[in-house]
Amino acid sequence: MAAISKLSFIAVVLSGVLAAPLDGTSKFTTHRSRISARGVDLPSYHPAAIYETFGDGIEHPLAKRADATSEDAAVSFLEGKLGFKKGSFKYKTGFKGEGAAHVYVKQLINGIEVANSVANVAMKNNKVVAYGANFVKPKHTGPSTAKVTSDQAISLAESHLGGKWNSWPVKTEYFIKDDDSAVLTHVVQIQNEDHWYEGFIDAHAGELVNVIDFVADAAYRVVPFTKQDPTWAGFSLLTDPYDMTASPNGWHQDTSSYTTTRGNNVIAYHGSASTGQTSQSASGLVFDYTWSSTTQPSTTNNIKVGAVNAFYVANAYHDLLYKYGFTEAAYNFQSTNFNKGGKGNDAVKMSVQASGTNNANFATPADGQAGQCNMYLWTLTSPKRDGDLSNDVITHEFTHGLTNRMTGGGTGRCLTTTEAGGMGEGWSDTVAFWVETNSTTPVDFVLGTWVYNNPNGIRSVPYSTNMSTDPYTYATVSTKNEVHDIGEVWATVLIEVYWGLVAASGYSSNKTDPTGTAGNIVFLHLLVDALPIQPCNPTFLTARNAIIQADVNRYSGANKCTLWKASQDAFAKRGLGPNAANYKNDYSVPSGC
Ligand SMILES: *[C@@H]1O[C@H](CO)[C@@H](O)[C@H](O)[C@H]1NC(C)=O
Ligand SMILES: *[C@@H]1O[C@H](CO)[C@@H](O)[C@H](O)[C@H]1NC(C)=O
Ligand SMILES: *[C@@H]1O[C@H](CO)[C@@H](O)[C@H](O)[C@H]1NC(C)=O
Ligand SMILES: [Zn+2]
């Protein structure tokens, strides 16, 4: 193959109308480099394209031949236009659109398709109205037979990309490298939780030379899910935070695709759900708005920051809890349920900076009807503070959706008594604690410090295993009748259980891995598993029994004594021993523990 690609290329470009930048430093249009979760550089290269449009159209070489198809015409046009030999191209696919017929053509080298070059030709009334192409005449062309086998390529791709081959047949294609050489590659599809890659393994050198990720990228500047509020570690620009198992189409698609804070799990909006969504700040689902801490949250820009964070946390919550069992069949909130059970059409509507102050709420109708979350501004400081940036508040609210849906079969009617409603508040605080606590040994936890502008937070005492700091026991319930007060007692009990499990089985920071065996992972499983097996309107006693039962179901009761034990942080320490009744504490444990 002639070694004149650059020159002929530039000549075409200069006579053309528009081209990608020729400047070698402008790599945005041709390259992409990402670092994978395992720290591997994932290169990607697409040679620069030329593109011309011709108004009413120009003639193609086969115009006089009545039997010429638009496929043949396009191939012949490109060969003439770009100065390639016959047989360098192959018709790939095409369709007749309303305005024009579209033909897509692939480059061939030694009769083998080139992965990263393609041309498109649009024809109207038998004339060419536009075309684009990024064909290359490589300086060096590697052999057309492979030295590395496809099986070897599969294991190389798996180890480079961190995932498993999905059994899609391995193809052989030439790949044009950015030094203008063409190498034969094995194209291997690799999938893991978050990505679906095509890896191109050099069939001689065994290197990974190119990576395509079929999953669209998205980026959000947000307070990371596990941080309570902006004071912990500020904002980060997170790329692709969604989980492919929980949200197979990402966060911006149900039956349509959106470039706003809308998707299959959540619609976050300011004002109106249909018109008040926040748009991407740049194409490719980039939501990169910078927070100003010194201006009011109600400035146009700060509203966008709030909406993006609310959208992100709500989706991160969906994906996390999905992995612990809050799935379609378990009555979760999704617009499309992918035929996995449950009722769809109920993505959460999340009103950002809704009209109310110093609070937040979450309404849970039955499965099939959208949940409604309202996040408010907090007025105790100047400037005011936006609850949409307080991840603990959002996590608390979305846990109402979890517990109301998973108790009693998705009706939203089973946490309605004072005691059960109070426990609902307790679960909500507990899940916020679970997401944000990163210690391996007991530490106190305080909720809402930032929005409430108070280091002691919005509850009466910090959550603590220290009986002087947090004295609540089962018997305390009889002295309370407000749901958040009762919730403090229930969360105190659950957090004791959490630390008991962490003491027994350790702590894992990999919270999104539900296969883990560490105590904190076990805890969230038991919390979620117990919800559908407890009765409608549970009490402290029945909910405790459901947790003990959940441990039998999932772990064959392996944690039974840890859950009960008085000496450790667990039920009996807070008076919920087996003989507790009528708000009278029992500090004993079952025999055998
Ligand atoms: C761990 O939690 C503390 C608060 O208890 C927080 O300040 C810190 O940022 C957290 N660290 C990580 C790595 O999340
Ligand atoms: C519990 O808290 C009290 C009061 O803050 C403190 O004096 C005591 O040392 C703490 N106990 C433990 C075991 O940390
Ligand atoms: C977390 O767990 C997932 C699932 O097992 C795993 O793929 C990932 O590598 C883990 N992450 C870390 C940081 O260990
Ligand atoms: Zn609440």
Image: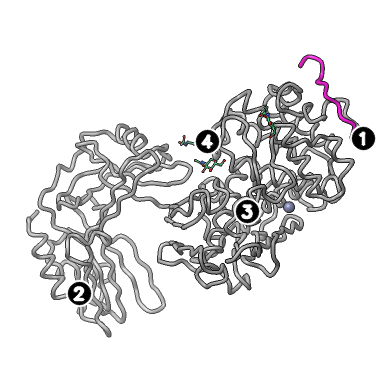
Give the Cα distance between marks 1 and 4.
38 Å
Query: In the image, is the residue at mark 3 within 8 Å of ligand 3 by its beta carbon?
Result: no
Residues shaded magenta: 582-593
- Does 589 lie within the magenta span? yes
The amino acid type found where label 4 is placed reads Ser
Give the Cα distance between marks 2 and 3.
50 Å
Q: Are marks 2 and 3 in contact (CB under 8 Å)?
A: no
Q: Are marks 1 and 4 in contact (CB under 8 Å)?
A: no
Quarter of the rendering occupied by the C terminus: top right
Query: In the image, is the residue at mark 4 within 8 Å of ligand 3 by its beta carbon?
Result: yes
SS class, disc 4: loop
Q: Closer to the observer: label 1 or label 3?
A: 1
Give the Cα distance between marks 4 and 2.
65 Å
Give the Cα distance between marks 1 and 2.
92 Å
Q: Are marks 1 and 3 in contact (CB under 8 Å)?
A: no
Residue 480 image label? none
Mark before the other along the chain sequence, 1 or 4 = 4
Mark before the other along the chain sequence, 1 or 3 = 3
* Left or right of residue 423, residue 162 in this image: left
* Left or right of residue 530, residue 109 in this image: left
Query: Residue lying farthest right?
Result: 582
Q: Which residue is disc 1 drawn over? A: 582
Q: Position of residue 424 (x, y in %)?
A: 76, 47
Q: Which residue is disc 2 drawn over? A: 62
Mark before the other along the chain sequence, 4 or 2 = 2
Mark before the other along the chain sequence, 2 or 3 = 2
Q: Which residue is disc 4 drawn over? A: 509
